Amino acid sequence: MEFVSKSGHIDKLSTPCLILPVFSKGKQSDVTNAFDKAHNKQIAAVLKQGDATGKAGNTLLLQMPAGSKTKRVLLVGVGEQGKTTDVDFNKASSASINALKRLPIKSICSALLTVDVTNKNDEWKVRQLVLKSREALYQYTETLTTSAPDAHALEKCQLLVTGDSSAVAIDKAATIATSIANGVDIAKKLADLPGNICTPTYLANAAKTLGKEHKSLKVTVLDEAKMEKLGMGSLLSVSRGSREPAKLITMEHKGGPASQKPIVIVGKGLTFDAGGISIKPSSGMDEMKYDMCGGASVFGVMQMCAELNLPINVVGVVPSSENLPDGDANKPGDIVTSMKGLTIEILNTDAEGRLILCDALTYSAKFKPDVVIDIATLTGACVVALGKHATGLLGNNDELANELLGAGIKAGDKAWQLPLWDEYRPQLKSNFADLANIGGPTGGTITAACFLSRFTEDYKWAHLDIAGTAWKSGADKGATGRPVHMLSQFILDRC
């Protein structure tokens, strides 16, 4: 859907549907009152009757009289007047599109930007309105034959500009937000695809396609033979149990000067994880197609960087494999040698994400990075610790960690920092190798990050554990596209 600014008098708008904010308490906005005054105070009557409550996310669709240039009005609750929070605004943005997306209309006009949101500016409101709208419109259709998309898709949303707001600034914010939303959609689409379609080779081909679409992207794919020459014994040990060959995918966006050190983002790309010999329980195993959400988010971020042609250097690295049980698969007790030369005792083959990430992190040093950020659905322990709301954040540099935390707050894609203390390192001790790939039953998220930290000592590094935030289960099963927005904000801040 296209988002563009719209100026003009509210009572003279010509639109199939106007989205108007209403408050649960206090006076209604000048915009709502001006429209109501020009239309026989129909809205005031509806509010007085209690048909619309003004509670955040509450909606009521009104049909306007014949001859009116505005054919419909959707009243959307935004909470108390003067006390609208970011949560209220997001609820209103999502609810408005959910209420309209099945109607036979292609264009709407939204007056939600006229609402003051506590501690938020116009740019933030545009960003969230676009992203929440696109989230509501997202449909997975790639493997559906009996469930066709809705016949009437919304194509255009005009953003009403009033007062001191600048139409130019609104349009610029909408362009940036649309590119972020495109990145989120790519991440969701890749993650939602089944494992028999979205294989490591499929991801590699998707990266090549992205490179052909954007001149700023240089795409390189290493096959298993090239990885073996580089000594990536840890990564390759995971793919031994699969008929699908592993791939190491690199996407370089060169938007800044050649002398500028790049941001490197590394995404775990396990296209299906059965756990290997340490096989997972069958219940819910279908969701292990989402074990590549970290890699999918790298695709989303690189799409955003290229689409906006950002003046910054960013490198995306996606180590991709499957983890299946087989006669040649890793066994508990096996010892493998990483690209860095460290030996690893595999105590649990289901702790495979760190085995592919460690070699990718070692490989990332070749780009002489300013910072490296890895993203992975790494530990169930992170879900236990933080639930589904916050991404786990650990790292070896507090300045970088604080940048990411700040970007998450701005984006509404939040993270929470966990400690990465030396006291946890002894849990990874092995009698037979330099380190074990698990650290026991306690502090699983932290010990996993401690493992990765052994391969990131030469640069500033942060680790994002998205096991709890990358997808939803149950009736709403599907990828969320997180943390594309957080990482996009981080990169935009650096621009």
Image (spheres, rainbow, N blue to C red):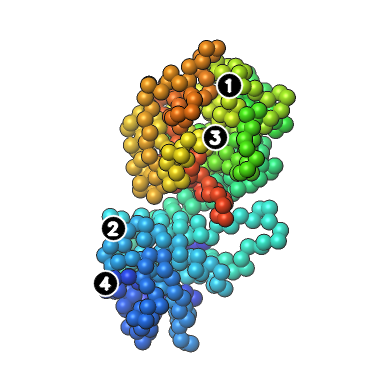
Residue type marked 1: Ile
- Sequence-first disc among 1 and 2: 2
- Sequence-first disc among 3 and 1: 3
Viewer-nearest of discs 1 and 2 = 1
Q: CA distance from mark 1 to mark 4?
A: 62 Å
Which residue, given by chain and number where applicable, does mark 3 sit on?
268
Residue type marked 3: Lys
Q: Quadrant of residue 30?
A: bottom left
* Disc 1, SS: loop
Residue type marked 4: Gly
- Sequence-first disc among 1 and 4: 4
Q: Are marks 2 and 3 in contact (CB under 8 Å)?
A: no
**Residue 247, x across and y down, in percent:** 63, 31
- At 38% across and 39% down in the image, what residue appears? 416
Q: CA distance from mark 4 to mark 2?
A: 16 Å
* Disc 3, SS: loop
Q: Nearer the viewer, residue 125 or 221?
A: 125
Q: Left or right of 13: which side holds 302?
A: right
Residue type marked 2: Thr
Point out the image quarter for the C terminus.
top left
Which residue, given by chain and number where applicable, does mark 1 sit on?
346
- Sequence-first disc among 4 and 3: 4
Which residue, given by chain and number where applicable, does mark 4 sit on?
26
**Residue 478, x across and y down, in percent:** 57, 50
**Residue 280, x across and y down, in percent:** 62, 35
Which residue, given by chain and number where applicable, does mark 2 sit on?
118
Q: Left or right of 121: which side holds 197?
A: right
- Sequence-first disc among 2 and 3: 2
Q: Are marks 3 and 1 in contact (CB under 8 Å)?
A: no
Q: CA distance from mark 1 to mark 2?
A: 50 Å
Viewer-nearest of discs 1 and 4 = 1
